[in-house]
Image (cartoon, rainbow, N blue to C red):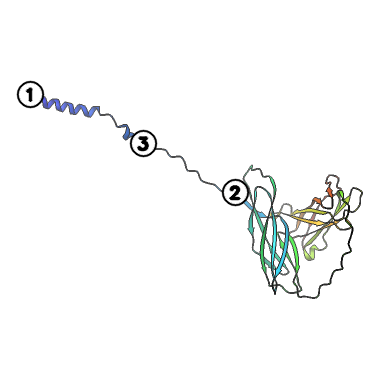
Amino acid sequence: MFAAVVLVAAAACGGGDDDVESDPTQQAQDTPVATPAQTLDVEPDTESFPAPIRDITIEFEGDPPTYSVFVLSAQTTDCEEFEGLGEMVRDGLFVRIEVTNTRLTEPGRQCFEVLETRQSRIDMGSAYTPGETYTVVVNGFPESFTVPGGPPTPVPATPVPTPTPTPLGPVTVERVTVLLQEVATTGMASFQALVLTKDREFAEGATASASLSGPVGSENLQSLLLDVVTDANGIADFRFLIEESGIYVFTVEFIVGSGAVFDSGASNQPFAITEIELP
């Protein structure tokens, strides 16, 4: 009887080993859990380029005078942002400064036209010779100043008061004359736009805005903008500093002020394409 009990107990123990089921909780712990892939923030591709310049103002204070230049640069699409100022470089009577923007270069990205501006101040110091005239060049846009203390400056004649002009109405650009005589000596090229009213009279006192783009095909392609008021002969004289030989495109973009309404479609010659060679 003792042997039977031992056999029954052994059988019970052996049967238990064969029928044990795996613990589902243990399986869940042993099964690796997939984790979502980490996403990385990727900076968009951009490129740097010279910013369009809208205005340059030069101011000084103290004795001897310390000069500062205020530069108004532009961003013309929503893909562009102001980047910064380059190093100021003194070159004889020239002071050269570069202002840059960045723009997105993602393939297929659509950019929309905007007009935003950014004003920057650059300290130019005080190491300038009295009586000398210096030219500050920002992205090809020139502005000159004369250091006080030199020979007396002639007092300009008091202007004769003139009556308020009547509104100019529709105006057109009759022609653009390109003058390159000064390029060899000063690097300055002159583009003279003749603006006429619908009655073929000189459009005096209108503000013309024009651009000069070039050199065409160059890695240093720039688009310079200037605003010039027409004189009594209807001439708006745009003067640009040329720093590289090549083909340039001059275009009158807008004409405003004094009641002027620019009719570009009726203009005879609102642009000019010319090749400029530096010595």
Task: Give the structural element (helix, strand or loop) at label 2.
Answer: loop
Q: Is residue 142 visible?
A: yes
Residue drawn at the location 14% of the way across and 25% of the way down: 8
The circle drawn on residue 1 is 1
In this picture, residue 188 sits left or right of residue 108 = right
Task: Give the structural element (helix, strand or loop) at label 3.
Answer: loop
> What residue is pinned by disc 2?
45
Give neighbour class at mark 2: few <14, some 14-19, many 20+ (Cα, 10 Å).
few
Give neighbour class at mark 3: few <14, some 14-19, many 20+ (Cα, 10 Å).
few
- Work out whether residue 63 or residue 113 is closer to the camera in this orientation and state it: 63
> What residue is pinned by disc 3?
31
Q: Amino acid at mark 3?
A: Thr
Give neighbour class at mark 1: few <14, some 14-19, many 20+ (Cα, 10 Å).
few
Task: Give the structural element (helix, strand or loop) at label 1.
Answer: loop
Residue drawn at the location 91% of the way across and 52% of the way down: 201
In this picture, residue 23 sits left or right of residue 46 = left
- Work out whether residue 48 or residue 170 is closer to the camera in this orientation and state it: 170
